[in-house]
Amino acid sequence: MNSSKSISDKSSQLSPLKQAYLALEDMQVRLEASERSRHEPIAIIGLGCRFPGANNPSSFWKLLQERRDLIREVPESRWNIENYYDPNPDAPGKLSSRWGGFLDQVDEFDPEFFGISPREAISMDPQQRLLLEVAWEALEDAGQGPRDLSSSRTGVFVGLTSDEYALLSYRDGDLSRFNPYFASGIARSVAGGRISYVLGLDGPNMSIDTACSSSLVALHSACLSLRMQECHMALAGGATVVLSPEIGIAFSKAHMLSSDGRCKTFDARADGFVRGEGCGMVVLKRLSDAESDGDHVW
């Protein structure tokens, strides 16, 4: 016999007042469950990163413990700083800072590992390449086999705000670069989608640009999606790469860059920020799911 039908039959035998009381009790239970889900803690079960001087979370933690400073002059591989530097921030076409936080390599990538042809990889923004690599590493750190997640309800939320690889492509004037892969290779909107496509994920996907807060808004969006039961697991993070001086020149004109390459937050000496690059990703689950799945919770 159907249990719900049995309960319904019994409640129909009750007085209208008792039926109303039972309905209120049921609504209260549903409301409490809804409120709990809205505020359920979110667990970080995996980490991945590429930062100046650190290719993984453990090496980054070591840098923090040692209080290391990884700010340096713009490397020759990006641009010749002598051609652009002028301490006067109002000097036309010049950078008022020589400094930044730079990754050692942004041009190394194994496309075939991800099922991408070398020809397509050339048209891919290094930010997209970094996101793929670091997402993979974060999933491995979480004990999730990236190749085993196909058709899973895993969401991807990434923050990006820079188009400097596209800027380099436009600048060199070589129209042969504009092949069928170019549009998807430079599009910020594709960055998150490429992760879902390569891994075969069926959860929600979002590429977000809210300037400096992009990665944090991506993380916030992932938490909301998990609490709304839109996905069982989520990847959240962001990437940025500094490849050309133009944006820095614009920041110089707005007097936004620190002249000595040091951020002096909440200090009377504060005179701007320092541009830097890197990529960070976290793997998230609702805490109750992480505990029931036996995941390691960072």
Image (cartoon, grey):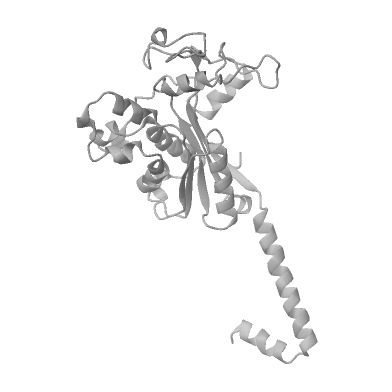
Image-based side of 232 in relation to 163, left or right: right
Give percent across and percent down for residue 139. Answer: 47, 41
Seen in the picture, residue 276 relative to 24 is either above or below; the reply is above
- Residue drawn at the location 51% of the way across and 8% of the way down: 87
Give percent across and percent down for residue 143. Answer: 50, 42
Give percent across and percent down for residue 295. Answer: 57, 46
- Residue drawn at the location 66% of the way across and 62% of the way down: 34
Give percent across and percent down for residue 272. Answer: 59, 19
Seen in the picture, residue 137 relative to 286 is either above or below; the reply is above
Image-based side of 278 in relation to 186, left or right: right
Image quarter of residue 36: bottom right
Seen in the picture, residue 249 relative to 113 is either above or below; the reply is above
Image-based side of 178 in relation to 76, left or right: left
Of residues 255 and 18, the one nearer the viewer is 255
Q: Is residue 114 visible?
A: no
The total number of labels drawn is 0
Q: Quadrant of the C terminus?
A: top right
Image-based side of 33 in relation to 247, left or right: right
Of residues 216 and 41, the one nearer the viewer is 216
Residue lying at the far right of the rendered structure: 17
Q: Is residue 212 visible?
A: yes
Q: Quadrant of the N terminus?
A: bottom right
